[in-house]
């Protein structure tokens, strides 16, 4: 177990936390999540985290201790004990789709000589090679391949080519705005990135790899070129790790662990950023 390091004091956390929360607050306001609603959610999470993550070994976690840890009144703590948002719930369609796509882009029988996903014919259609139905059934038999195909066609994840074969589209890797898959990965990937960063702050020796290449004060053309290059490199890295994982899964006995390898890209015109000044300029308002 990694040795713990002294945590930073709360005052020093305010600036980075404000930067982290700013895009989230923009999402909340755009989606109609009000400040009181967010406070209710945070109150539940504070109690939930204090109740389970800060319990003392061999001792019952009391309302008084949870109240002391969180600053929430003991009566509210008593009401909220056992509550909290379901942070690990995976929608069935998300889990199923991700497993099928991961196999399509990595398993040798479903990829070409360059490692690209093959266009797959439907079962019963003329031709050689694996079928789309075999792909789906190699992952799950709980749902008909036709049902998965209809869902994917509706989401733009696959297309049917002139020969009637099913082709995987780029949209399969970038879920449609606002759909269940995008919202699930929004929560999971941000959670894992933040969780890794928090562990690195709290541990004497950072246990997780977390690095970024970043440049400021560059032209739009350079930023766009580097984003395009980064996208190509990142996609190849993800495909390579997925191929290794698919191979390893054939011999793995299974267990209770999970891991996540994620990449992100971001660029912006900083002259358009609308944020409060770093120092008080007299408190102008409109």
Image: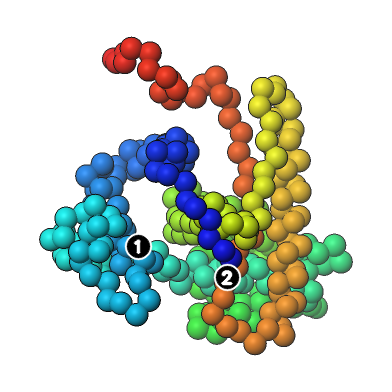
State the SS at label 1: helix
The residue positioned farthest toward the left in the image shown: 75
Q: Please tell me in which quadrant of the rendered image residue 111 appears.
A: bottom right
Q: Which residue is mark 1?
A: 49
* Residue situated furthest bottom in the rendering: 253
Q: Residues within 10 Å of mark 2 (few under 14, many from 20)?
A: few
Where does label 2 land, which residue? 1
- The residue lying toward the viewer, choosing from 77 and 19, is 77
Residue at x 75% of width, y 70% of height: 244
Query: In the image, what residue occupies the spot 46% across and 72% down?
Result: 92
In the rendered image, residue 116, in percent from the top left (x then y), is placed at 78, 62
Q: Tell me the CA gap for discs 1 and 2.
A: 20 Å
- Residue at the spot 20% in from the left edge and 64% down from the top edge: 64
Q: In which image quadrant can residue 135 be found?
A: bottom right
* Of 157 and 258, the residue lying toward us: 258
Mark 1 or mark 2: name the one nearer the start of the chain. 2
Residue 39 is at least partly visible in this image = yes
């Amino acid at each position: 177990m990694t040795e713990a390091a002294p945590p930073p004091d709360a005052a020093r956390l305010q600036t980075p936390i404000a930067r982290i929360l700013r895009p989230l607050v923009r999402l909340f306001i755009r989606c109609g999540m009000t400040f009181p609603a967010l406070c209710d959610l945070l109150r539940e999470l504070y109690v939930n985290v204090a109740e389970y993550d800060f319990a003392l070994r061999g001792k019952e976690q009391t309302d008084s201790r949870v109240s002391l840890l969180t600053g929430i009144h003991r009566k509210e703590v008593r009401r909220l004990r056992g509550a909290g948002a379901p942070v690990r719930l995976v929608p069935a369609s998300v889990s199923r789709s991700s497993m099928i796509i991961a196999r399509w882009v990595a398993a040798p029988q479903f990829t070409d000589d360059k490692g690209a996903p093959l266009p797959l014919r439907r079962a019963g259609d003329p031709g050689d090679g694996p079928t789309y139905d075999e792909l789906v059934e190699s992952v799950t038999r709980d749902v008909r391949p036709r049902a998965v195909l209809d869902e994917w066609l509706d989401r733009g994840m696959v297309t049917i080519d002139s020969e009637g074969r099913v082709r995987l589209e780029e949209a399969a890797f970038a879920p449609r705005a606002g759909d269940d898959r995008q919202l699930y990965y929004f929560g999971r990937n941000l959670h894992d990135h933040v969780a890794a960063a928090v562990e690195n702050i709290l541990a004497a020796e950072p246990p997780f790899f977390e690095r970024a290449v970043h440049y400021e004060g560059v032209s739009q053309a350079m930023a766009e070129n580097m984003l395009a290059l980064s996208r190509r490199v990142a996609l190849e890295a993800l495909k390579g790790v997925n191929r290794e994982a698919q191979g390893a899964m054939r011999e793995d006995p299974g267990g209770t662990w999970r891991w996540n390898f994620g990449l992100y890209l971001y660029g912006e015109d900083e002259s358009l950023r609308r944020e409060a000044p770093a120092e008080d300029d007299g408190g102008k308002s409109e």
